[in-house]
Amino acid sequence: MTFSFQTDLGGALLPNPILTASGCAGSGKELSQFFPLTELGAIVTKSIMIKARSGRATPRMAETPSGMLNSIGLQGPGVDYFIANDLPWLDAQGARTVVSIAGETVEDYAVLARKMRNLPGVVGLEVNISCPNVENRGMVFSCQPETARAAIEAVRRNIGGDLPIIAKLSPDVTDIVSIAREVANAGADGVALINTLLGMVIDTNLMLPKLAQKTGGLSGPAIRPVAVRAVYQVHAALPDLPILGMGGIMTGRDAFEFILAGASAVSVGTASFGNPTAAISIKSELENILQEKGFATLQEAIGYAHRN
Amino acid sequence: MNPSSINNRAAQITAEVISNKRVGAYHHMSFLVGDIAAQALPGNFVAIAVGGEGSAMILRRAFAIYRATEKSAHGGLIELIVAPHGQGSRWLTSLEPHATVDMVAPLGTHFGIPTEPVRALLVGGGYGSAPLFGLAELLKSRGCRVDMVLGASTANKIYAPLDGKRAVSSLTITTDDGSMGTQGQITDVLSQIIIENEIEIIYSCGPMGMLEAITKISDRFGILHQCAVEESMACGIGVCMTCVLPVTGDDGVTRMLRSCIDGPVMDGSRVVWDSKRKIPEGTFGA
């Protein structure tokens, strides 16, 4: 019998469970120098906003032990440019695209959702309600159940059709399970866990925060145990809610850890910065590990660490 | 967003260290890279994974290519000048011959070569001189006159190999402490050299402050200035958006461009200098 690597991410049927992480794959063109994008389960775009955004001032990046801080601040050309330029290119490659959207207001999410109707090659929507690089921490929608619910409801009401909605959550909360439950009740078909953790590095020569905007999002293997914990907790509480797991996945072994914790698919982010073909190696390594462990399908392995 | 010119010649390879020699404050390192040596042009850079398997340093380190040789005795060769000033570059410079590294190359834009012979001035700060010697040879082969100015804080931070100087008509050196050449900074000697040699274009590589100062001078003389910028990068391939700097396009709009894809070689007069820690007013999307 042939091994089945397919996954169902809240209604998005993907040939394999390896995706890019939002903000870690450029427009797709950059990574396509190194491998065909069709090799991925799906490509997740950087978060698209209504208007063009310059992002934050530099320095925007600091390497940390087994990780990095970034404060890009959602630099991008805006949704209309994306729909007119980047998306048709991705579709022409045959890529399956999950569009990440981010808004500053609930109304922004509604407008973006309407623009996402009937776009070519789009297999899902990741709703970024957890970017830490915003001026006002109160603006991180996923940090409160009420604002998380409002943003996802706005998307649900406006998206129409059956495009899966994945809500991306922040780990910087007291109880991530309650936020996951809230967005599921508001109409999310799945959750993406986790966005970066808010962090800071101080340059001890300058004796000032290293990043121009002082704080940034921590990613990379340093946050992997936090991410695995979040996936495990949410899967334990909401076993039917599909999870896109991410946070410092560097190898197939790391991806397997997320699958065991309950993720239906995983996103590769920071690893692609250090290694442009990381997602492809992770994919083949994970496929080998699953078969070595005796799983006939990926599905059997999802949440396997929860057995008694 | 500005149309980006992705360097589609890049490949990820395993490169073998052929030699590693200390030169002053730097290391001259040669890597066996195969066919991609033929793809490298002056100004291009490489990105190398550091620290070995399971390294806690998860980001690549970027180095300007000093020289690329298509057909050496070993095959395709890329040479780098590495300053061991951080944990990653110290790891790299500790490698012995036959060790291998994961390298992505060649990356980024390259110095533009004029179609007709011109009088060019090449200006390098510290190890920023590295990409200028290959450029000097290329310019000379196209009939250009090439003058060079190198500056550093002190003598052992001047990288000026004997064989690299062949293509250069004059070499002026400045050091902050006067331990080699003229005491002072590059910018102290630039105007006189531009006038005396009737310079038509400046090519430069070095710290951002130096590139900014050169731009002021080149703008005053109304001559072209192609500079290879140095911004800290996480990926080197255009996906992370960390190495951006504000650059004004043909349309007069300033955008945050990636120094790894739209650079490192940029038109100095188009860069909005002195933008550290702030986004210039009026930048696209600000």
Image (cartoon, helix red, strand yellow):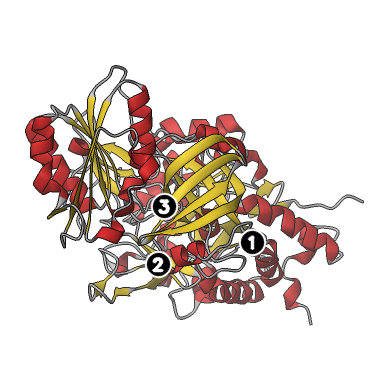
Locate residue A45 relative to residue B112 in the image: left or right: right
Give the mark nearest the N terminus, 3 or 2: 3
Residue A42 vs B199, above or below: the answer is: below
| Measured Cα–Cα span from mark 1 to mark 3 | 50 Å
Q: Nearer the viewer, mark 1 or mark 3?
A: 3
The answer to whether marks 2 and 1 sit on the same chain is: no
Camera-side residue of A129 and B202: B202
CA neighbours of label 1 inside 10 A, class few (<14), some (14 to 19), many (20+): many
Q: Residue at x 51, y 73 (%)?
A: A222
Q: Are marks 1 and 3 in contact (CB under 8 Å)?
A: no
The amino acid at mark 3 is: Ile
| Measured Cα–Cα span from mark 2 to mark 1 | 43 Å
Q: Nearer the viewer, mark 3 or mark 2?
A: 3
Which secondary structure lies at badge 3? strand
The amino acid at mark 1 is: Pro
CA neighbours of label 3 inside 10 A, class few (<14), some (14 to 19), many (20+): many
Chain of the residue that carries numbered disc 1 in the rendered image = A
Instruction: Return the residue at label 3.
Output: B81
Instruction: Return the residue at label 1.
Output: A242
Give the x, y percent position of residue B13: 61, 46
CA neighbours of label 2 inside 10 A, class few (<14), some (14 to 19), many (20+): few
Q: Residue B198: tell me if it is visible.
A: yes
Which secondary structure lies at badge 2? loop
